[in-house]
Amino acid sequence: MRPDRVPYLLELYGSLRDQDVSWEWVLALDGVSDEGVPEVLCTDAPVKVVTLPRPVGAGAARDFAVNEVTADWLTTSDDGDVLPAQSLSVCLRYAQKHDLGWCAGRSAALHPDRSITTWCCSTPPGFHAPGDVWRHWATPDSTIPIGPTTLPAPTEVVRASGGYAALGRTTPISSASPALPAVLCCRPWSTTTASMRSR
């Protein structure tokens, strides 16, 4: 694991600890050793670190991690992502309240100076019928109509659809620094009080 990625990974971990829903984190190391993974991640119960023996690419690494998920819902993240406090429960509650198969939120870039730029996709907020989202993709060269990362969906739906292999082994995540795929899972917030983290 590259030492320069550790601070980002710890910031993501900190943002997970700020969630108000029970979560588990399957951290898939894509062909790198778990040497250098911070001890706090190796010893915290909701975190499971899995190593793949060789690089397989972000999509395949995520698919491997999905096999380790025990929660009913999941979403994904890269090591450089940060989740706003309570964002998992907001999306999860909304998806469950409206019996949705998935739910997308806004994505934002957090800059080194801590300023934020929100990315607004071409798909307007609201409910969309099956097959409707792609209509907001003007051309194949246009920006994608919805951000595919941190998209909560039922684990069984992700598994049934074949997972995340659309990002193949040759898909570059970043030319400067390969990302560490992670699968973040949240249990339904309303099932029992034991599934909610107490503050």
Image: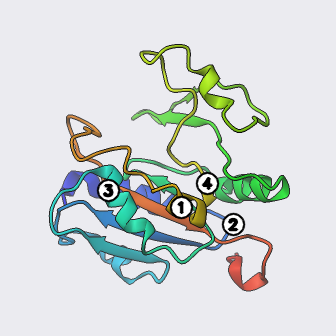
* Numbered circles on residues, count: 4
Q: Earlier in the sequence, mark 1 or mark 3?
A: 3
The structure residue drawn at horizontal position 60% and vertical position 50%, both measured from the top left corner, is: 84
**Where's residue 151, x and y in %?**
58, 48
Q: CA distance from mark 2 to mark 1?
A: 28 Å
Kindly identify the amino acid type of the residue bearing the numbered disc 2: Asp
Q: Secondary structure at mark 3?
A: helix
**Nearer to the camera, 43 or 138:** 138
Any part of residue 198 in sight: no
Residue assigned mark 3: 60
- Image: 48 above or below 78: below
Q: CA distance from mark 1 to mark 4?
A: 15 Å
Kindly identify the amino acid type of the residue bearing the numbered disc 4: Pro
Circles 1 and 4 in contact, beta carbons < 8 Å = no
Disc number lying in front (1 or 4): 1
75 with respect to 12 (left or right): right
**Where's residue 112, x and y in %?**
39, 35
Find residue 152 and name its label. 4
Q: Earlier in the sequence, mark 3 or mark 4?
A: 3
Residue assigned mark 1: 160
**Where's residue 21, x and y in %?**
68, 68
Q: Earlier in the sequence, mark 2 or mark 1?
A: 2
